[in-house]
Image (spheres, coloured by chain):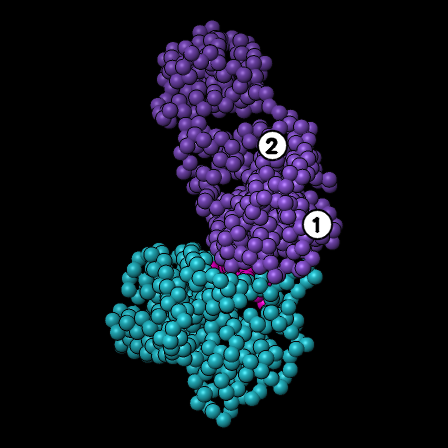
Chain colours: A cyan, B purple
Amino acid sequence: MNLRVGAFGRQEGASAVAICMFGGSCFAFDSAALFSDGNASYLTYAIALIASLLLFELLCAALNKRGGLDLSSLVGGSVVKRFLTVPLMLSLLLAALLPMQQCLLTVTQYVFVDAKQASVCLYLLPCLTLLCLLGAEPLVRTARILLPVLGISILIALVSNASQMHAYRLFPIPVGKPEKLLHESASALHRTVSPLLALLCIGDGTQRADAQKSAGRIGAAVGAIAVLSMLLGLSCCFSYGLLRDMPSPFYRLLVEARTDSPALRLDRAALFLWTACSLLGSAIEVFAAGVLLCRTFGVRDVRPVVCALSALCVSAVLLLYRDSEPAARTLSLLYRYGWIGAVVPLPLLCIGGRRKRVCAAS
Amino acid sequence: MPALSGHLKKRLDDNRRTIETIFRSDINTDLICTPFRIGEDRRALAVCLNGMADERKIGSAILRPCHFVHETPKGDLAAFLTERVLTTAETERRSDLQSVTDAISEGRTAILIDGEASAILCDTRGYVSRAVETPQNEMTILGAKEAFTENIRTNVTLLRRILKRPDFVCAFRDAGGTNRTKLVLAYLDGVLQPALLETVRQRLDRIRTDDALSIGRIEQLIERDSYLPMPQMLKTERPDRAARAILDGRLVLLVEGSPLAGVLPITLSSLLESGEDADMRQPVGTVVRIVRVLGAGMSIGLPAYFLALALHHPGQLSGEILETVIASRAMVFLPLSVEMIFLLAVFQLVREAGLRVPGAIGQAIGIIGGLLLGQAAVSANIVSTVVLIIVALTGLGNFAIPDYSAQVATAYYRILLCLAATAGGLLGLAAVGLVSLAALCAMKSFGVPFLTPFAPVTFRRGGLLVRARLQNRSASSDWSNPTGRDA
């Protein structure tokens, strides 16, 4: 089978998770919903992260019991479980397309104001397809190279904004609405669990169960540090009232920071660095979905699959961008309930795996 | 011509006829067949190629001693001659036609004896070759001043003079179709990874073309991912640099007729290292390396970044810079992107012209191209001064890259990024830059990822920017010598 997973180490795996987490969390969230009754973004994100790590540990334990390294080994030969992976694939694709949709929004609203969305997508589609065609090994290595650069750019953005940060803007936390906090945590769960799922889909690349597990943990920790520091920085810079109406708050953070030198401004360079990282994260998730599909349904070559999935993703991005009520509603629904596809099938897969093991042993 | 099969016969006349037929002696007058007698009764024939073999060596080490043999022994005459008569340093007996014709082709002399179904091959090679000279392309101030030549034996000697250790292996072999090109695989036995050696051997075995005549061609025949512009083998003309690579646990490939040694596997870091980096003091070497890496980065990204900002994101440039750009372009009729790509093409043209003409004229072409042509182009409003300065900086950065193949490869990326920046500004630049970076991550040089030790992260003796301090230790481990055996 030509699955192009290759071999990579703990650091590369962790970097891939961190980049996916950054792309998904910094670009893809619904500002209007998140900051509607106060600011608890940093709390809900932390809750979602803990829940994701618990799920990841559960999956790793199940895989360990099965003696497999990738998610498809939980499926076995069961037809029911095979179809349980479909929502997982869709969830991974959703995790890939939401940051791209947000990138498209940022680029067309702030950078190329007169450009049509389709013409911007013309840059995204070949890039995404080519990245996916290269396979997992180059993607995670690229993540390893870009991660320190990304970290430096985040640090610069935060340090430059330090003078404008005020702790009082972190409040009010909507403690009076626990259902709201829970709901936002569940929404954030999709953004935190998808990178770990992607790692598990290409998990055989790490070659050892312990390497895979620590790659997930370290990646989640690094990604969480990056995202939480950005969320805290953002929350300290702008009040929740301002953030609620802000379409791409992280870009605003860059513009406010005005990371200038006397000769040139660097905010757009930083924005496109983040866009590239986000695109890389999307490519990793699309590739992971492709590999899961190939393994589950016995497709022998991943290349046509990832080409099709990339095209599907970019088409969906274009469709969701339309300035119409159904598109906006769909997008809002995807943000709010996308986590269901990622989270619900996982325990079912684990349970199935255990039972089969017991039967085989007896 | 297909590979020869068959063996020598006992009759001398048959063997002579066969060899003359193989070498087309009726039209190929280079073949010299000198008949002589050993003792009173045994006829013999010395066969060699004119110009390839040293006639004085043949006379003094083969013909003259054979004339003094008055009585031939009853047993094995060839063994008697080899042990008691011939005075050449290297002799061997072969009976298959392929070996005999190969030996004659490379300048050795074959002695055929009537009644013997084998030939004695004597080393009489004596063709004219260039003397050891100073390096032409990798000039250094602090390093050694010797360069490889076209003679493979001289090259091996140059390496052996530096590496005086018994585990230094120079494995002679050949590669290619009919025209078997002589090669040497030079490495430290036990330090070089056996898997790498086996990979290279297998790929050399697979070469079927006769075109394997130089190190550059052999590189293309044995590499993977040949569509990528970056080289997968470091080519050096300096024996000290090749020796250093061997000590680091790499393989050096020498090819007959090629004054360059191929070092493999390589990484991006090794392409940005110069031969004399290690000769400088560590802080100075680090500064030089930082300047070099900045130059390389500038040579790849500066024109594209400028184009992206000037064409699509002018707000990112300060007012003063923007005014200067606008003022300098006031009378220029070419669009900015065309102007930039035109000047980059002119730069490549000047560089190529300077390389292909002899020394002093080549330098003159560089000066004329750089100064007069640039000035004239600005005066004629074909190009603007700002773009000229950017292309000049790009050119300087490009020359800071020590490896010629890498210099040429960066030109591809430069133009690609310029086109992307023209089309999509920073978005195009980010998209193409990301794909290019991922493609470099996918590239491997003989199984070693090209961006080692950054991705994948491995042990390393020194970084890309910081030159490692020389330490007084006997062995060190690295990605090229993972066992850490004494190197």
Q: Which chain does tag 2 point to?
A: B
Find the magenta span and give its range.
A139-151
To which chain does the residue with label 1 belong?
B
| Residue A183 is a magenta residue | no
Tell me if residue B52 comes above or below residue B260 in the rendering. above
Residue at 53 percent across and 11 percent down: it is: B63
Left or right for A22, reference A306 = right
Visible in this render: residue A189?
yes
Who's the residue at 71% across and 52% down the image? B287
Instruction: Say what secondary structure mark 1 lies in.
Output: helix
Residue ID for mark 2: B353
Q: Position of residue B381 (x, y in %)?
A: 63, 41
Mark 2: secondary structure: helix
Q: Nearer the viewer, mark 1 or mark 2?
A: 2
Relative image position of residue B418 (x, y in whole percent):
54, 49
**Which quadrant holds the N terminus of chain A?**
bottom left
Q: Viewer-proximal residue, B174 or B226? A: B226
Residue A230 in which image quadrant: bottom right
Residue A332, position as x, y percentages in the image: 40, 77
Residue at position x 53%, y 53% in the image:
B421
